[in-house]
């Protein structure tokens, strides 16, 4: 069974974890909440969703997963300075795994140095951050560039989920 890591910290955008998490789990994939401390209770910024960290970032390796989903809100800001989080995402990229980031999620990709030369989208106020990090910003509901899937906001969740599930169904090609 394919495994999907959800990188999460407090103050995430509630629907950006809840909707993709439920859709991916319902599609038959194993979903794992990865955070900074195993067992920690995480609460969304709107207090509508609560999740428990299944595995801490220091317990996981990229080769244990087929994809990583990075919800938005303030969660990426709370994770982007953690070197293990950044290394995990870099390793996922190096292994050609699916990397799906919505809203503020691309902040982690920026901090990991993974945006240069990529076509991406994000929450509109972060547009300049993506551009300054070398990405080509595209203002549309979902942008797919290689193994990357990015979306702007909760309203884009259906397209984000559709493209993430599509990539999960496609065999991973190992980078040369």
Image (spheres, rainbow, N blue to C red):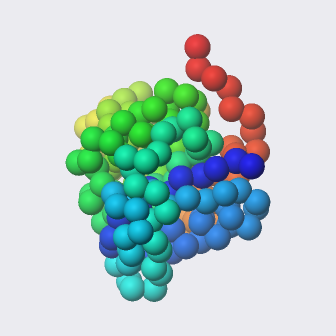
Please name whichever residue, 2 or 149, is drawn nearer the observer in this view of the structure.
2
Q: Is residue 82 left or right of residue 3?
A: left
- Residue 143's place in the image compared with 26, above or below, is above
Q: Position of residue 102 (x, y in %)?
A: 47, 57
Q: How many marks?
A: 0
Please name whichever residue, 22 or 110, is drawn nearer the observer in this view of the structure.
22
Residue shown at the point (32%, 49%) measured from the top left: 107
Please name whichever residue, 41 or 18, is drawn nearer the observer in this view of the structure.
41
Residue shown at the point (34%, 61%) measured from the top left: 37
- Residue 155's place in the image compared with 34, above or below, is below
Q: Position of residue 12 (x, y in %)?
A: 38, 69
Give residue 67's quadrant in the image.
top right
Q: Is residue 143 visible?
A: no
- Farthest residue, direction top: 176
- Residue 166's place in the image compared with 172, above or below, is below
Please name whichever residue, 104 or 123, is drawn nearer the observer in this view of the structure.
104
């Amino acid at each position: 069974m394919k495994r999907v890591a959800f990188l999460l910290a407090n103050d995430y955008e509630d629907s950006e974890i809840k909707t993709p998490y439920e859709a991916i789990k319902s599609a038959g994939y194993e979903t794992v909440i990865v955070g900074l401390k195993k067992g920690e209770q995480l609460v969304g910024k709107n207090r509508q969703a609560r999740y428990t960290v299944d595995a801490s970032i220091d317990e996981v390796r990229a080769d244990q997963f087929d994809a990583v989903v990075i919800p938005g809100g303030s969660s990426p800001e709370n994770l982007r300075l953690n070197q293990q989080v950044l290394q995990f995402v870099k390793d996922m990229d190096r292994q050609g795994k699916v990397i799906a980031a919505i809203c503020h999620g691309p902040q982690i990709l920026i901090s990991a140095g993974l945006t240069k030369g990529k076509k991406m989208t994000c929450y509109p106020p972060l547009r300049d951050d993506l551009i300054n990090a070398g990405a080509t910003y595209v203002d549309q509901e979902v942008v797919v560039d290689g193994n990357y899937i990015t979306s702007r906001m909760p309203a884009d969740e259906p397209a984000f989920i559709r493209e993430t599930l599509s990539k999960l169904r496609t065999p991973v090609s190992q980078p040369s």
